[in-house]
Image (cartoon, rainbow, N blue to C red):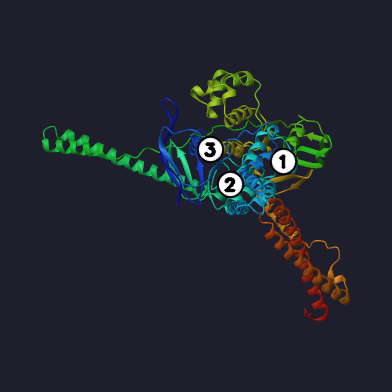
Amino acid sequence: MIDIAVNGLVKSFEVGSILLDGLTFDVHEGECVGIMGRNGCGKTTLFRILTGEIAPDEGEIVINAGKKLGLISQIPRYPAGSTVEDVLRTAFAELEAIRHKMEALADKLTASAPKTLLDEYDRLSNAYHVGGGYEQDTEIDKICNGLGIPQSMRDQEFDRLSGGEKTRVNLARLLLEKTDILLLDEPTNHLDLKSVEWLEDYILKFKGTVLTISHDRYFLDRVVDRIVEISAGKAEFYSGNYTFYLQEKQDRFNRQLKQYEQEQAKLKQLGYTVERMKGWGINNRVLYRRAMSIQHRMERIEKTERPTKEKTLRARFGEKEFHGDEVLSVKGLKKSFGERTLFSDVELTVRGGERIALLGDNGSGKTTFLRVLLGELSGEGKIKFGPSVKAGYLPQVIHFDHPERTLYDTMLYEKNCTPQSARDRLGAFLFSGEDVFKTVGTLSGGEQSRLRLCMLMDEKINLLILDEPTNHLDVASREWVECAIDEYEGTLIFVSHDRYFVDKFATRVWELENGVIRDFPCGYAKYRSIKEHEAAQSLRQPKKKEKTVKDVGSKELEKLVRRLEREIAAQEEIIAALDAALGAAATDYQELLRLTAEKQAEEEKLETRMAQWEQAAAALEESFGGYEHE
């Protein structure tokens, strides 16, 4: 069954500039499809058309009737003073409406109430139960734990959150809404590694349909079934994940280039034949007509376009020669804000040529640690750089002192270079033609990162510090940055949630967790293996018990078993009585809520008693060589 059908979609925002040009594709029920393409190719525009936010110039969108569609790229506005908890609970608006109707009906339900009212209350009660009305708190806790939204954030006003935090809360709200079709626009941009992995697991278990725009190559590899690439306003299809897409795209390029070269060779040979036959046919009409026939055949041949590769970045970091072994040493480093300590007792040494990834959850203090190293923030302890070390820093949030200047003027004023040198450097970073006269303030986040890298690469440095260098960059731009870093031979310290990037460059991992930096002298794959092994070990370790049954004598064990049996029987009677009370309270909403909560608590007690009885009975059987339950 098709959930989304896109037919002949055309959309332009400027005269003569067509963004989508006859875009056509289908998405089947249960698929997870990755939407790829260069920044500005129309991916987000497609999502806005799918949700009805904007209308196409031509073409149509058909969404499977009865399917609920949700998008997170746009963050809705909420009433002033709304907390994060309030925002999350808007996901249950329909259930809350049902609850209010039930409460209104409950006031009217008396012994003489008509049957229609009782039937309506039963219908609403069933809808509330089936819709998960009694599991709202559990669902919210599960989603918030997975996406790293602590209770402290849930109590904050939504408007006071950062852009990244708002996106995370909005994603949680969308997941709580139980939509049938998820549209995810860069869902991993503001998530830390644990949250990204949780989201991947959620999508893999999700029974609905997913369309995702993402530049996270690990994410695409793990979750998508196929890829639709938007190129020149049309759709190219790849029936696999990112790794398949990458190989298939190269294979298609090679096939098209080979076909183009063969056609050109054939046309060249035919052209040579035509010219010779025309020369011979000056006095021979038969040869001349044959030459013209061949020429007409050449014109009718359907010609393959010469495939072109995207422009690549032609730049590298300017490097300063490093003398010595030790680039950086840190002793007893500590940083606190008020009563909160981000990290303490940090002891680290960095040697020349190392490539170190600093990993940790959002808010753990990674950016603060980098800024303390660079002297932008004060901290306790000692930081010592080697005598010939010169550092270059790319911050997570790019800031320009004069956003009103053009790219060209920014290079002239801030890098003190010649007009031709400014043009050459900007061109190496794919800012060419009229692009150089755009004002810096009008650039996208990815373009600002690219401009800052352009300015940074000109400096002679031997310690490069990067804070989320691939944020806001499309796949091609990420590859450009990777090429430049690949050629850089100095020392590298970086923060990144892009696992592809971390895996490619890290030769050492620093993990910042619970105020402690733990040093792993290995790459990302080995680091992950160590963490998974440690997690498995912790699960295998037995939980501490107040008193184990093996410490109890056989007579005491027998008494314990009998006592537990009596308690289990009593507990079962309590639950049976609650079941009867629930049936009697079917028309009393408030009493129903109270009894449901009470029954759940009693069932948990019963499970605890049963587990204790099983353990005691097994120990008694082992003690006597057999135990028969009466």
Residue 420's x, y, as percent?
A: 54, 20
The residue lying at 71 percent from left, 59 percent from top is 536
The quarter of the picture where residue 306 lies is top left
201, 356: nearer the viewer: 201
Question: Which residue carries the number 1 mark?
Answer: 154
Tag in front: 1 or 3: 1
**Circles 1 and 3: CB atoms closer than 8 Å:** no
Question: Which residue carries the number 3 mark?
Answer: 476
144, 490: nearer the viewer: 144
Distance Cα–Cα, label 3 vs label 2: 16 Å
Residue 53's x, y, as percent?
A: 51, 34
Residue 360's x, y, as percent?
A: 71, 43
Q: What element carries label 2?
A: helix
**Circles 3 and 2: CB atoms closer than 8 Å:** no
Q: What element carries label 3?
A: helix
Instruction: Judge left or right: residue 617 versus residue 492.
Output: right
The residue lying at 59 percent from left, 54 percent from top is 115
The quarter of the picture where residue 254 lies is top left
Residue 100's x, y, as percent?
A: 65, 44
Q: Which mark is residue 219?
A: 2
Distance Cα–Cα, label 1 vs label 2: 27 Å
Task: Tell me which numbered mark, 1 or 2, is placed earlier along the sequence.
Answer: 1
Instruction: Judge left or right: residue 607 versus residue 469.
Output: right
